Amino acid sequence: MQSLRLLLLEDSPDDEHLILKTFARENIEVIHTCIDTRNGYSQALTKNQWDIIISDYKLPGFSGIEALDTLKATGLDIPFIMVSGTIGEVTAVEAMRAGADDYLMKDNLNRLVPVVERAIREAANRREKRQAEQEIHYQAYLLDNLDEGIISIDKQFVVKTWNQGAEKIFGLTATECTGRKLTEVLDIIFYGHDPQKEGFAVVQQVPTWKGEVSIITRNRRQHSVFLTIGRLDGFENFHQGFILICKDIEEIAQAQHKLIRSQAYIISAVENTADAIFALNLQHELIYFNSAYNQDFRATFGKDASTGLNLIELSGEKTRQILEANLQRVLRGEKFAYEHFVSRPDREQLTFEVSVSPIYGLEREIIGITYLHRDISEKRRVARQVQQLQSEILDNKLREQRIQAAALLQGQEQERTRLARELHDGLGQMLNVLKLNLFQQHAVPALLRSIDEVITEVKLINNNLMPLVLQDFGLEAGLQQMINQMQSSGKAEIYYFSNLKQERLEGKLEVSIYRVLQEALTNALKYANAGHISIQLTRQPDSLLIMVEDDGQGFDLAEVGQKQEKGYGLLNMRFRIEALNGRFHIDTRPGRGCVINIILPLISSRATEQLIS
């Protein structure tokens, strides 16, 4: 014994250490759990598998005898050894009667390892005995419940056993037949031979005899059965004699008839299917084909197919290579399918789905190949039409979504422009006039400062709605003003590069670019806590490349996309770019910053106006 799974019921750490030390001296690896409560013990019994249980006699709240009763109630056969420092002879006898495998005194644990080994060995023997008994009972149950009739007789032909299968076949119960001579119960006719000199006489020289016989029961009912007679040489307490195994042939005949009918149905189905089916031997010679294949064969070769034709000899180089490759795969036991294309002058190219599978012999050896050719030309044509229609529907949906997004964004910008103008021309002018009047009337300085703050806030709101510098001086001036305002907060260093050279783009295109970059900078400062931000605008002959890069904390793009309230800004940016037929890509991971790349096609102002409108 090299290792041991031990469930230890003990409330004394010193005694636990003493028991484990005893096993350690014998170099036995112990995986153990120490329990001292009733509930813990009950749970440990079913939670793990244990080789043995060692229990103190007295435990807090319950005893070793109660622990033994709990084990017996579970039905588990785990060796149980009582170890105690105070157990007396009467208590030890009580424990053994209760089912303990042994008991030991704590002051004498020299016998612990031999006792444990013996208890485990005896438990294993009990399990093997139970398993053997269960196997015997199961085999007896199987023999008694077989459809075949099992009859045993002694050397004087007296019936000893008669199973339920025999009762079912011959209509005679075991009570009626056991103890009587076989000839009083059954007449066995060995078809043209003397029954006394046929099967039973032959079995005297050879172990078994098999053959078809006719058996007439006592009520004159005749049964055709396949009979096997075996010799019982006897051993231990079993008798010598013969065993008869009777199989009702009528059931087999009915099964054969059903099989023949099923085969006829299969053959009819194969012959009348629209799929071309044929079979080849390993030399590529036709051994079977249906009418659909014969039609295809006639259309290809100009004559009817016939068994024995070698397809390798009839086919071209490409087809020969396919047949040879298929043979190699089938010889490896593979079943597979592929598409085969056939061009015919009288019609468009045909597409066939070819299924290939091996043909097995009686010994499960591969003896041939089955081919099934299914014309899927129409199916493929319909599939292409459906795919094209789906693609058109998707394109229309995307186009509609872009138009809706562009219209929405245009409406937003128009409303922003209107509000900005009203604030600038209305409320802004009124505040300036109010400040001038208050200044002339020598108003309190605190009141003048409040007016200045209101004017500053109105200018900020006006600039956020629609920066006038963007409308008046273009994209670069608007971006530079926005960068200066954001950089004044001191949160991050913003680097800006552009080769536009004050080039003016179409007004609505400039607004869209401004809004996207405004959202990107706001996100980098507000959410990413970026320390450095880089913005690059690179003018190409027919496109504008935009890159925004920051060293912030980054984010999980998939997670943000699932949270609508956090992903709205990114979605808005993407909509704006895609509405301009541009491409928008974000590369970010938590802790790795964020890089936004945008490619916008630059077309004529009129085309841009039509696209956005």
Image: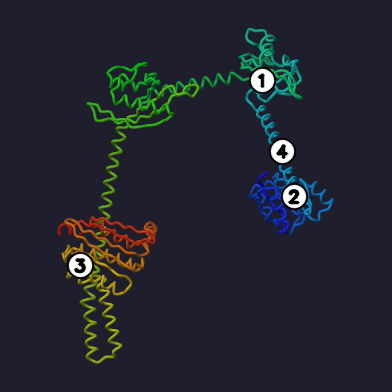
Residue 180, placed above or below residue 534: above
In x, y percent, where is residue 153?
A: 72, 19
Evaluate if marks 2 and 1 touch, with contact meaning CB atoms under 8 Å apart.
no
Depth-wise, is mark 3 or mark 1 nearer the camera? 3
Q: Marks 1 and 4, how far apart in space?
A: 43 Å
Give the residue displayed 27% in from the left and 39% down from the top.
385
Residue underneath mark 3: 476
Q: Marks 2 and 3, how far apart in space?
A: 89 Å
Give the residue displayed 74% in from the left and 42% down from the top.
118
Q: Along the line of sight, which residue is nearer the eye, 280 or 376?
A: 280
Q: Quadrant of the C terminus?
A: bottom left
Evaluate if marks 2 and 3 touch, with contact meaning CB atoms under 8 Å apart.
no
Instruction: Identify which amino acid the numbered label 3 is placed on.
Output: Glu
Residue underneath mark 2: 68
Instruction: Identify which amino acid the numbered label 2 is placed on.
Output: Leu
Q: Along the line of sight, which residue is nearer the eye, 28 or 116?
A: 28
Instruction: Identify which amino acid the numbered label 1 is placed on.
Output: Phe
Evaluate if marks 1 and 4 touch, with contact meaning CB atoms under 8 Å apart.
no
Q: Earlier in the sequence, mark 4 or mark 2?
A: 2
Residue underneath mark 1: 170
